[in-house]
Amino acid sequence: MKIFSDKFTRAIVLCCAFMLPIAVSAEQQSDEITDDGALILEHADQNENFYSSATGEFISHLRGNVVFRFEDLRISSDEARWQRSAGIVNFSRNVRAEQRGQLLTCERLHFVRDNNLLTATRNVVYQDSARITTIRGHTAEYMTNTKEAVLHGNPLLTRFDSSSDTDTTFLRGRKITYNDSTKIATVIDNVNIRRGELTATGQIGYYFANTNTAQLRVNPIIHYETHKIVGDSVDLVFNDEALESAFVVGNTHGIYREAADTTADTTVTNIWSDRMHMYMFESGKVRSIKAFGNARGNHANAPNDSIGNTMSTDISSDSLHVFMFEENGKIRAIRAYGNAHGRNAEWSPASETDTSITHIWGDSLRISMTDEGRMRLMRAFGNAQSKNFVVGDSARANEVSGQIMTLIFNNNGKIERAVVTGNAKSLYHLEEGEGGGSNNATGDQIIVMFRNGRAQKLQVRGNVKGFYSP
C-alpha cells in the first residue's frame, strides 16, 4: 500500500475526476447536492490518502469533523475510512446519521452505498422523526431507502409522553424492527411492555407510535397492579397518562385481586370467556371488565375476621360485565346477560349447618356489592328461578320463580329477603318455634324473610293460592 501527500493526491484526483468523487469544503458543496446517488464528502479537518495495490483503489483516512452526505442522509463522526470507488465508508467515534428527522448515534458505523445499508455497533441509539420514540441496542441495521431500523442485543424501545416526564412506555425484546414511515415497531422473542403499573409479556409484539397502541401475540400475559389477564392475543390502548383499555381474545382468563385493608376482607375474582375487555379510569385504576362468549366468573373473599367465614359467588352467562369503585378498587356491580346463573355461598368453618347456598337463574342477572366488597343484592330478570338451602339439608331446598326476582343479603353475606314478582311461585320450608312446615304458594308477588340462611316468614300478595303442610 502506498501513502500519498495531499498535494500529490490532489493531482491524481483532478486527473481522475470523471471516476472519483472530489473532497471539498461543506460551504462549496452545499449548492451541488442532488439525489442522484452520489456519496459526497462535505468536510474533514485532515485527509490522508492511501493507494491499495491489492484492490487497486484509493482509501482516504479522514479525521476531525468528518461529514458525508448521501441523498437526504447526513453522517458525521470524528474519524472515517473511505473506500472511494466501492462507495464504502467506516465511521468511528461520535457517529451521527440523520435522515429526515431520524437520528442514529453509535461508536462505529459501516455504510455501503450500493445497498443503502448502515450497520451500527456499540452504544446504538435510534430516534424516530417525531423524536418521541427511542430505541437502544448493541447493534443495528438501517435501510436508507425504506427508512427501517433493525436493532439487536436485547434492545429497549422507549416512547416518551409529551405531556409528562414520568409517563413513559417501554418495550423490550430480542430484536426490534422500527419503520419510520409507518411508525410501527415489531418486537420478537421475550417481549416485555411496561407502562406505569402495567407489565405485559409475549413472544411477538407490535407497537403503533401514531395511535399509541400495542399488540401481543403468542402466550401473552398482562399484569396490572395485582391483577392478571391471559389469552391467545392482547391489544393495549394507551392515553397520555396510562393504560386506557385492554382487549384479550381467545381462551381468556382474568384474575382481579382486591387487597385486604382494615375494613374488609381480601377478595379474588376470576373470569373466563372467549373474549375480554378491560377499561380504566383516568386515574389508572380498573373501571370495568367485560367478558363475552361462554363467560364464567367466581368472586370469593379470604377470611379476615374472628369468625373466619368465606364468601363465594359463581356466575355463568353468555356475557359478563364487572364494574369497580374508583376510590378503593373493589367490585361494585356484576351484570350477566343471556342464560345467566348465579350461585352464592357463605362458608362457615365452625359448622356446616351455618353454611348456606343460594342459586339464581334468569335471562339476565344483576349483582350489587357494598363499599366493602360484600354481596348486597342479586336481581334476575326473565324466567327467574332461585333455590336456597343449608349444606347438609338440600332435600329441604327453598324454591321460588317468577318474572323478576330480587335477593337481598345482610352484612354477613347471608340471604335476608327474597322478593319475586310476576307469576310468582314458591316452595319454602319454614321454621316456627319448635316445629315448621312447607308452604306452596302462587301470587303476583311473594316475599320471603330469612334468618341465618333459613326461611322464617312468607308473604304472598295478589291472586293468592297455595297450601301449607306441617
Image: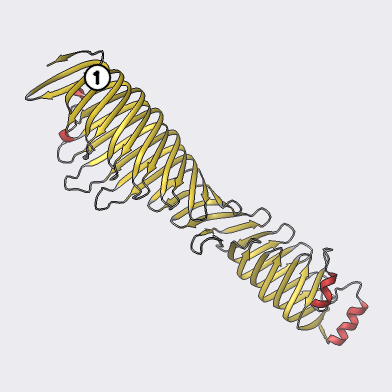
- Tell me the quadrant of the picture where the C terminus can be found: top left
- Residue 38 is situated, as x and y percent measured from the top left of the image, at 83, 67
- Residue 200 is situated, as x and y percent measured from the top left of the image, at 48, 52
Residue 156 lies left or right of residue 459; in this view the side is: right
Residue shown at 26% from the left, 25% from the top: 419
* Of residues 363 and 177, the one drawn nearer to the viewer in this rendering: 363
Quarter where residue 353 is shown: top left
Q: Amino acid at mark 1?
A: Ser
Residue 144 lies left or right of residue 288; in this view the side is: right
- Tell me the quadrant of the picture where the N terminus can be found: bottom right
Residue highlighted by disc 1 = 426
Q: Reply above or below: 15 against 358.
A: below
- Can residue 160 be seen from the camera position used here? no
* Of residues 359 and 279, the one drawn nearer to the viewer in this rendering: 279
Q: Reply above or below: 318 against 251.
A: above
Residue 243 lies left or right of residue 450; in this view the side is: right
Q: Reply above or below: 191 against 120.
A: above
Residue shown at 21% from the left, 40% from the top: 412
- Residue 21 is situated, as x and y percent measured from the top left of the image, at 85, 73
